[in-house]
């Protein structure tokens, strides 16, 4: 296949880097050193080694606080081996830039260095690890060739660390991300699902990973994932990289990637923790069972054990029972006082938010040596939700018993996900490094419908049918969203010039089988069985990380995407990092990514005498481009106090965006026309973000603000926007250690007005505030701004074995927000669009944690 000239240039640039003289620089870290000294201080020992090796060392102040004496007695030993022996670290923690050797510090039990086969020589208590190593020099994996300090990362990685996770006291990833700037969580209260929007783009444009492996979503690996199904049981941290990451992570990473990093070994010899959380739902709470239950009740057990420094096992179990939010509704048990609608039917049956019970279980085994590791993890998740329909049918005849009852209808939804993950990593041939991951996952949403005799809340015999039709017998479990697939990813890293040039090769394979998206029905009659199709996608990529000077690093990359349906598509990236000085970095990141059409867009089919809905297998993949300029700053501003600040601006462009359209149908009698999909939309976004952190052993403070502009939405193209519509956001987080060992945590978020356009038929009369487009009038609509504030207080007892945390979430009592037309003309009814479900009012919680 002939590639476009512009894409050939990217490939030629990488090949040019490979052609650099391989012997242009002596490998300092492999230099043979012979040295003998008496007992001297660590600082003196490093000075002696600098003279012998002809280099200089850069390391954190905390590593020099060791008062122990050392004796150097080595003959023809590589420098890296001597440093490893002195500090008890691994070779990957020695980074050569020019003639400077950066020593990243000892790994901690919470450090992601463990993901890359690094094993601490002594299992450390993370509470005793210096603040700088935990927060300033923490190690990240997302977008890196191998785990490394966040300050050395080529990408701008945002980390939600263990400290913040513990202080937020949340149960799943959807709740965790609610407090992150420019990440909006969309809740579907009826079926209990939570999806995200990142920088204004829906969940199909962000890739959700767990330990670098995409999580099975409704129709694809990694995208359109229900985040409420990802428990926080063993999550160590979450890493976020915004912008198109198509070279490293393949399809559907247009808005960025969210990588959930889980625990791989115990912090101590044995870790045992038991958590119990009791929480109100708005003002609703009790300890009753079944239909009368109110509130939220969570139990969690975590156990992990290190058999040795090399072998570790662990697992977790949890149950999260959400008894639903009653609100203005009356629950599921029949009451003669239920409200009636205009037709006389009872309409207050059920809940504002449906009851849901979730179960999560996982187990892992990991084996680490200094040069190799293997890891296996199995995970199972299940949630059961009941949606109580609001209509009550009085006088429904039970044919098998020949008497009439008041009948309600329940929809039952069951979400299941299985995940098997195997990984291996290690150092091989001449300082090369490899990683390989494999995963098999199943994910699906099942549905069944039953009639309920409200006199005793029992299910009726399915043979009695249901109201409004004589054709439907209540179904057994039917598939809505279903996907299963195998995923594998591998990388090979080879230092070509030590400390100067690294080459990375990688592959990705994703074979997913899924149905078209959901079971279609008309007047409660199933019209079809979901169609199953299998898509095989994959890719191969090549990139190089070149330290042009000790201050300038560039990484160009090229990826070829393969598909069983589409021709080869390519993605390109170019990342540049300029280290202005020891306090300031400047990054320019340019990247592209592809979004392949999902199963619903390609294969959906719903055709009967009067309807015609068809997918389009000829859709083109969407193509996204981003460019980001980011400045970051950090410095020590006091005794063990650090300041971090960043300022960034990102531009996004998406073309060939897929949209639903209607054509005249060729068949007679079709009322809806031909509903299908086509590539007509475009999107442009501009995101400006500023962030500042002040960190110390006593408090953590963070402020972040953003202004995002966008042209285009899920339904409209950027051509329909004359200018960018603007949304502003502000986040604040604070944790503080108070006297008497109390700990306080506060999380605040402000989201400004969110504007978008509404399109109405052109035949309506014009008005002064309307902009006319071909066939439609365009009216601006926007939501009200809202504030959210969470606060909690914690204290430990019995030598920190028992931890008690009490708090209140959503202090301002936010519930739903809606898009409302701005100054509509008189002839158009001022109406609200579909509400956005955020919260159900403020809640109180108590969390008890026992740690062995």
Image (cartoon, rainbow, N blue to C red):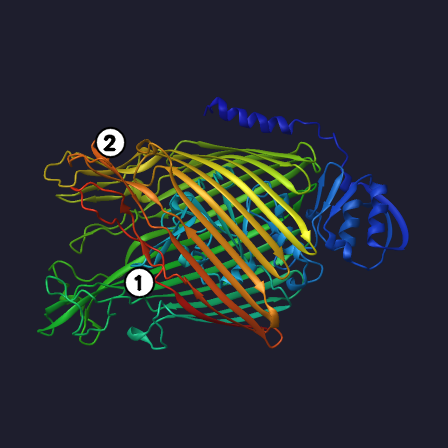
Where does label 1 land, which residue? 353
Q: Please tell me whether residue 358 is drawn above or below residue 820 in the rendered image.
A: below
Earlier residue among tags 1 and 2: 1
Q: Distance between the Cα atoms at labels 1 and 2?
A: 38 Å
Q: Can residue 160 be seen in this view?
A: no
Give coordinates of residue 521: x percent, y percent.
Answer: 20, 52
All told, the count of numbered labels is 2
**The quarter of the displayed image where residue 33 is located:** top right
How many other residues sit within 10 Å of disc 1, few (<14), some (14-19) or many (≥20)? many
> Residue 773's mark?
2
User: In the visual, does 725 lie left or right of 78?
Assistant: left
Give coordinates of residue 281: x percent, y percent.
Answer: 36, 67
> Residue 8's mark?
none
Q: What secondary structure is marked by label 1?
A: loop
Please state which of residues 2 and 85 is positioned toward the viewer in this rendering. Answer: 85
The quadrant in which the N terminus is found is top left
């Amino acid at each position: 296949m002939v590639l476009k000239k512009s894409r050939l240039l990217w490939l030629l640039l990488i090949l040019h880097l490979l052609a650099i003289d391989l012997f242009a620089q002596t490998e300092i870290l492999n230099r043979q050193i012979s040295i003998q000294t008496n007992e001297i201080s660590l600082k003196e020992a490093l000075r002696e080694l600098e003279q012998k090796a002809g280099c200089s060392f850069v390391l954190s102040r905390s590593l020099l606080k060791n008062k122990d004496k050392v004796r150097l007695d080595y003959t023809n030993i590589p420098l890296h081996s001597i440093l490893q022996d002195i500090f008890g670290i691994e070779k990957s923690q020695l980074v050569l830039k020019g003639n400077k050797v950066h020593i990243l510090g000892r790994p901690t039990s919470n450090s992601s260095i463990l993901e890359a086969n690094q094993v601490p020589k002594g299992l450390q208590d993370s509470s005793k690890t210096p603040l700088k190593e935990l927060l300033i020099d923490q190690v990240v994996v997302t977008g890196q060739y191998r785990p490394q300090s966040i300050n050395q990362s080529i990408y701008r990685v945002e980390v939600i660390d263990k400290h913040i996770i513990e202080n937020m006291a949340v149960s799943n990833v959807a709740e965790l991300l609610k407090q992150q700037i420019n990440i909006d969580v969309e809740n579907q209260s009826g079926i209990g699902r939570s999806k995200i929007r990142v920088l204004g783009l829906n969940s199909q444009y962000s890739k959700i990973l767990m330990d670098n492996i995409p999580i099975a979503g409704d129709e694809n690996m990694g995208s359109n994932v229900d985040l409420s199904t990802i428990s926080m049981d063993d999550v160590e941290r979450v890493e976020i990289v915004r912008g198109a990451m198509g070279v490293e992570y393949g399809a559907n990473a247009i808005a960025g990637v969210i990588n959930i990093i889980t625990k791989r070994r115990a912090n101590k010899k044995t870790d045992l923790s038991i958590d119990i959380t009791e929480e109100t739902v708005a003002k609703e709470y009790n300890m009753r069972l079944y239909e009368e239950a109110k509130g939220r009740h969570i139990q969690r057990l975590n156990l992990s054990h290190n058999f040795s420094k090399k072998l570790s096992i662990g697992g977790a179990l949890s149950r999260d029972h959400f008894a639903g939010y009653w609100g203005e509704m009356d629950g599921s048990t029949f009451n003669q006082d239920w409200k009636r609608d205009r037709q006389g039917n009872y309409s207050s049956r059920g809940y504002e938010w449906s009851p849901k019970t979730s179960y999560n279980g996982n187990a892992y085994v990991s084996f680490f040596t200094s040069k190799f590791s293997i890891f296996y993890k199995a995970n199972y998740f299940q949630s059961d939700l009941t949606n109580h329909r609001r209509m009550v049918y009085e006088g429904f005849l039970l044919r098998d018993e020949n008497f009439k009852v008041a009948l309600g209808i329940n929809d039952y939804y069951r979400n299941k996900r299985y995940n098997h993950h195997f990984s291996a990593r290690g150092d091989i041939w001449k300082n090369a490094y490899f990683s390989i991951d494999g995963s098999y996952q199943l994910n699906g949403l099942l549905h069944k419908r039953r009639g309920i005799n409200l006199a005793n809340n029992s299910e009726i015999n399915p043979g009695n049918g249901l109201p409004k039709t004589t054709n439907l017998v209540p179904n057994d479990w039917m598939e809505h969203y279903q996907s299963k697939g195998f995923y594998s990813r591998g990388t090979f890293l080879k230092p070509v010039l030590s400390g100067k040039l690294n080459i990375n090769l990688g592959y990705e394979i994703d074979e997913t089988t899924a149905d078209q998206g959901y079971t279609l029905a008309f007047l409660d009659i199933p019209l079809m069985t979901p169609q199953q199709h299998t898509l095989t996608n994959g890719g191969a990529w090549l990139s190089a990380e070149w330290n042009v000077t000790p201050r300038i690093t560039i990484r160009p990359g090229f990826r070829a995407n393969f598909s069983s349906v589409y021709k080869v598509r390519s993605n390109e990236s170019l990342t540049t990092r300029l280290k202005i000085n020891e306090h300031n970095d400047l990054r320019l990141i340019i990247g592209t990514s592809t979004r392949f059409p999902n199963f619903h867009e390609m294969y959906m089919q719903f055709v009967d005498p009067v309807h015609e809905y068809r997918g389009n297998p000829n859709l083109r993949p969407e193509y996204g481009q981003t460019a980001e300029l980011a400045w970051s700053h950090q410095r020590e501003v006091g005794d063990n106090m650090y300041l971090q600040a960043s300022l960034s601006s990102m531009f996004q462009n998406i073309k060939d965006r897929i949209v639903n359209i209607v054509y005249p149908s060729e068949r007679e009698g079709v009322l809806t026309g031909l509903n299908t999909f086509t590539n007509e939309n475009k999107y442009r976004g501009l995101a400006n973000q500023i962030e500042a952190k002040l960190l110390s052993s006593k408090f953590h403070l963070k402020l972040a603000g953003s202004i995002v502009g966008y042209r285009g939405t899920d339904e409209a193209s950027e051509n329909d926007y004359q200018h960018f519509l603007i949304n502003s956001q502000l986040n604040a987080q604070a944790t503080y250690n108070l006297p008497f060992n109390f700990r306080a945590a506060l999380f605040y978020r402000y989201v400004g007005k969110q504007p978008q356009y509404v399109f109405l038929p052109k035949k309506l009369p014009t008005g002064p505030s309307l902009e006319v487009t071909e066939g439609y009038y365009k009216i601006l609509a926007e939501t009200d701004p809202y504030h959210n504030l969470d606060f909690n207080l914690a204290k430990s007892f019995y030598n920190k074995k028992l931890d008690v945390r009490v708090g209140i979430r959503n202090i301002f009592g936010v519930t739903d927000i809606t898009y409302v037309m701005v100054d509509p003309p008189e002839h158009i009814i001022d109406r609200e669009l579909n509400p956005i479900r955020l919260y159900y009012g403020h809640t109180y919680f108590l969390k008890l944690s026992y740690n062995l």
